[in-house]
Image (cartoon, helix red, strand yellow):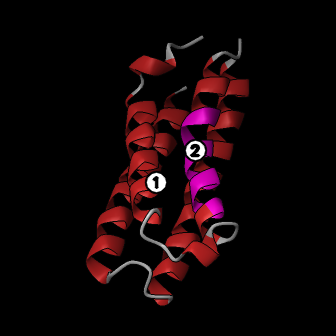
Amino acid sequence: MHNFKKLAIWTKSVEFVTDIYKITNTFPSHERFGLISQLQRAAVSVPTNISEGSAKTSNKDFARFLEISLGSTFELETELLVSLNLSYIDVEEYNRLQEKLSELQKMIIGFKNNL
């Protein structure tokens, strides 16, 4: 078992959740049950699955939760692109979030491969 609070991937993913919540607060209210909800749920899924997986007794089980977490990061990529296309975020914000997301993806993959 791992202490998820000491994992850099968990800390970075919690920070990313905060970014997503802040940015979605600027989205139009008609997206409340659409894109806002999707982005927030996918973002929260990343650290949640890392923390849940850390409680598993085998690295194989933990790796499965990391895969789910990674899948959520790829879902976020799509949702951020849609947000850009709809002009809910600008190119600079998109690039900033995409860079953070890419770093997080690399960290999760690296951690999973080292289990």
> Residue 42 lies in magenta, yes or no?
yes
Q: Is residue 22 left or right of residue 86?
A: left
Q: Main secondary structure of the magenta part?
A: helix
In the image, residue 81 above or below residue 42: below
* Magenta range: 37-49
Residue 55: % across, % down: 66, 15
Q: Is residue 25 left or right of residue 62?
A: left
> Residue 19 lies in magenta, yes or no?
no
Q: Which residue is mark 1?
A: 21
Q: Could you tell me which residue is drawn at 55 percent across and 51 percent down?
A: 43
Give the mark count. Answer: 2
Q: Could you tell me which residue is drawn at 54 percent across and 36 percent down?
A: 47
Give the amino acid type for the residue marked by disc 1 in the picture.
Answer: Tyr
Q: Could you tell me which residue is drawn at 40 percent across and 63 percent down?
A: 23
Q: Quadrant of the N terminus?
A: top right
Residue 4: % across, % down: 50, 20
Residue at the limit of the structure toward the front, as seen here: 29
Q: Quadrant of residue 25?
A: bottom left
Q: Which residue is mark 2?
A: 44
Give the amino acid type for the residue marked by disc 2 in the picture.
Answer: Val
In the image, residue 74 above or below residue 94: above
